[in-house]
Image (spheres, rainbow, N blue to C red):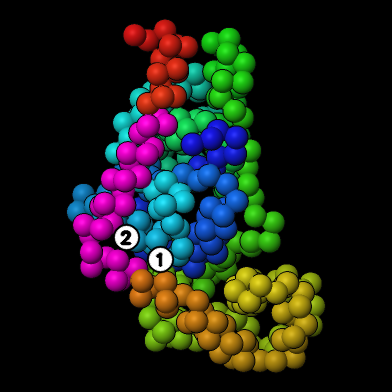
Amino acid sequence: MSNKKLVFSGVQPTGNLHLGNYLGALKNFVSLQKEMECIYCVVDLHAITVFQNPKNLYDNVLETTASFLATGLNPDKSIIFNQSSVSGHAELAWILNCVSRIGWLNRMTQFKDKAGSDKEKASVGLYIYPNLMAADILLYKATHVPVGADQKQHLELSRDIAQKFNKDFNCKDFFPIPEPLIPKNISRIMSLRDATKKMSKSEESDYSRINLKDTADDINKKIKKAKSDSNSIPGEIKSLENKPEALNLLTIYSELTNKSLEKIVSEMAGKEYSFLKAKLAEVLISEITPVGKEIQKLLKDKSYLKKILKKGTEKANIIAEENLKNIREKVGLI
């Protein structure tokens, strides 16, 4: 595998993937595999920074793999594997723990958000997992990483760590400085119940999100119950600034139809939100239910999913071991 342009990204196996994951990450993954060499990882070591029921974690790794395949990732074009199956991730993470600085980790806002008010009770893993993320990327000398706005700070840390390693061990350009790939036209997909929050697997109400495994009936019910607005749809985006739920529905419709938000608002101006909801449910059912059916089909053949992961692990291990051999030499490990 060439190191010229190499993409690395990972998805946590923590339950149902949803529309936000699909539009924000998975569709982009499929596009990238047509342009560059790609490594896509089910990051199960990241998942256990907070306690996971072991049976659920096992099942979720396979379901995330099925979701990768169902949305169009091709294991013959991209390397698909689970993180814990390549021990180099953990080994390099420890080396990078010794390169990274506490001050850098103290600036990570996601730890503060996830740990909440009682950070003393958070796991050490949750605190240092940005170093593991850096190891994930640098283990393969990835040059590009698709990131959303909430992960940009972690990629900046990966860049800082790469630069410090190269300087500390006098090996200029050993680790490439990974570049962010931020999709220009992808908007944040917000909760259907509270559009001030991102659509999330962890939100209590299942009506807050469209899951990739939702049936046509599920989607219809959720869109009908989604918060919108009592007035008709305005003719300009500015009028939606204080109406986040209405704006969210229009944004989702815009993403699914590949039309600009301005064009969608113009087309929908003066119409009731019930009209938009009917149209939105229609395009969601058309795009999402085939994915959900394919996920369910793949989950019936767990041996096939494990075979895909094993094949990906073998490919990933070849690259990881070659790079680790050089890393150990640089550090002075025998």
Q: Look at label 1 and name its amino acid.
A: Ala
Residue at 58% x, 9% y is 170
Q: Which residue is mark 1?
A: 70
Residue 278 horizontal/vertical position (percent):
56, 90
**Label 1 secondary element:** helix
Residue 116 horizontal/vertical position (percent):
44, 45
Q: Does the stretch in magenta take in 53?
A: no
Which of 66/152 is in front?
Answer: 66
The image quadrant that residue 213 belongs to is bottom left
**Label 2 secondary element:** helix
Q: Look at label 2 and name its amino acid.
A: Glu
**Label 2 CA crowd tier, 10 Å (few <14, some 14–19, many 20+):** many
Residue 112 horizontal/vertical position (percent):
49, 41
Q: Which mark is residue 126?
A: none
Q: Which residue is mark 2?
A: 63
Left or right of 46, for residue 267: right
Magenta-tinted stretch: 295-320
Q: Quadrant of the C terminus?
A: top left
